[in-house]
Amino acid sequence: MCTIRERASRRAACVPFAIFITRRASTIRAMEGRDHRKALAQGLGALLVLASASGTLLHSAHKPLDAATARIIADTGRSQATEAKEFGHLRRAGWLPDGVAAVHLHQLRKQVSRNEDKRRAHAR
Amino acid sequence: MNKILEIFLGILTAMGGFVEIGELTFMLNAGSHFDYRLLWVIALGTVGIMVYGEISGRIAAVHGQPVFNVVRERAGLRLGLLTLVAATLVCVLTCAAEIGAIAMLWQLASGWPYRGLIALALLFFLLVVWALSFKAIERVFGLLGLFLCVAAVVAWKLHPDFGRVTAGLVPSLPSHDRMLYAYYVVALLSSVMLPYETYFYASGAIEDAWTPRDITLNRVIVIVGFTLGGLLGAALLVTGAEYFAPRQIEASLPGTVLLPVASELGQAGVWIMLAGMFFAFAGAAIETALSSAYNLAQFFGWPWGKHRKPREASRWTLAWIAAFVLAAAIVMTGVDPIRVVEYSIVFSVVILPLTYFPLMALSRDRETMGAYANGPIASTLGWAYFVLISIAAVAAIPLLVLTHGGEG
């Protein structure tokens, strides 16, 4: 189930895709007119738009933030747990961009599981 | 007027290029573990890098010789080759860590997959180093790295206790974790005095065609630029002590540093910090990859430098491309970039004496350096630091093992 916020963010991502398609078309037109400088600028613009669109989509594809935080806190009692709590707190207060907080928690979760694997291997 | 502008830009570039991922995490964690007790190491290391930076820049300006020409000439083939292999390994490892950290930063901003971003970062570096001149690379990444000054604003806003800050400038042993404290002393000293900074600085002086007339420029840049860089490092340690220590958080990811920034400066601060980290880490990645190529070319006598066309310095060009590819391949395996940089910093200290002994030997030689040979201050400081880094080099590996890689 995705939240209203996630649905809205996916819809918002469609806008840059639409711009990308129109820019791509105008890039091809510029190429055909042999205006290479304009074509290059248009192409770069199109790539930037595509990058931001994919970024928005991938950000919204991450697991809901609070669930990710809860899992890290459940996984470990060490510094990562406090870090996850702080990130959650600052994100809710609106001081951290949602996407940045989501990806950081994702990176943190991966690190915690990697550390756990290492600890288990040592114990064995 | 041009000279003043050049000095000003040189200072800012030296300051902006001072911090990289290893220094960032070590400074934060040093503050988090030991409060202000390790501030003296930053001061000590900053003076050390000034001393050797000044000597290497002076040799390049007067004698036209970069570091590894001197190493080959003064240390002989065997010891020189050992230094070359170790220095190249450390440079490639540091470059790998910077590329990994950049991929993590880009992932924070975009949400794209990590390995894809490593490939993108590799492509970015190959294009940038191929297309831009030496001056442009140095200025763009050095100056834009100054976005990191936001860390100093954060440290100021955390209201550090200046009594404790001053006390931190005097060495004192903590009552707990003394072995870990010793490990941090060695690691912080190494992170401030990373050898690639001298390789790159001296090679850059030759790229910029310095002459004895640039000796003053050299002195002002290393003294003022590195002092400001050291202050930036100290600001990170203060942040570690004031924000991370009470919460018992250890910085283990580049994004962790965003916590105090967001808490003090909000979203705008976060984006500025991300930009600052990107340019600082990218600058370090380029410096380490180019340093590997500089070292190889200078040791074996190949033509080198960005001032030459790639066709005229083909082996040097291939060497920096190979350094980037190898570094990207290392982080592509999934190894943790922070772990990589921790090891590379500790191993760096081992090669410091091997690099600096030949420099000291040449810089005091009046026959070669003439009126520009070491004076009493440079000689005393140079040899004092040589003894210090030799002790640190001997202690580095045992401390790494005894503290389980700094985990206590």
Image (spheres, coloured by chain):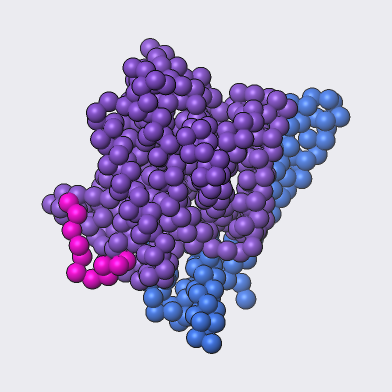
**In terms of depth relative to the viewer, which is nearer, B59 or B319?**
B59
Q: Which residue is drawn at 61% across and 51% down?
A: B327
Quarter holding the N terminus of chain B is: top left
Magenta stretch, residue numbers: B170-180
- Left or right placement of residue B41 versus residue B272 in this view: left
- Magenta highlight on residue B172: yes
Residue A51, horizontal then vertical, whole percent: 66, 49
Q: Is residue B270 left or right of residue A17?
A: left
Q: Where on the picture, by quarter, is residue B14?
A: top left
Quarter that holds the C terminus of chain B? bottom left
Q: In the image, residue B388 lies at what x, y percent? A: 30, 48
Q: Colour of chain A?
A: blue
Q: Can residue B73 be seen in this view?
A: yes
Q: Residue furthest right?
A: A32
Look at 45% across and 48% down and name the residue there: B351
x then y, percent, for residue B35: 24, 60
> In terms of image quadrants, where is residue B100?
bottom right
Give the overall secondary structure of the magenta segment: loop
Q: The purple chain is which one?
A: B
Identify the residue at the far bottom of this view: A124
Residue at x 27%, y 37% (from the top left corner): B381
Establish if B388 lies above or below B47: below
Is B315 positioned to the left or the right of A59 in the image?
Answer: right
Q: Residue furthest top?
A: B1
Residue at image location 50% in from the left, 26% down from the top: B65
User: Does residue B100 lie above or below A23 as drawn?
Assistant: below
Is B362 contained in the magenta span? no
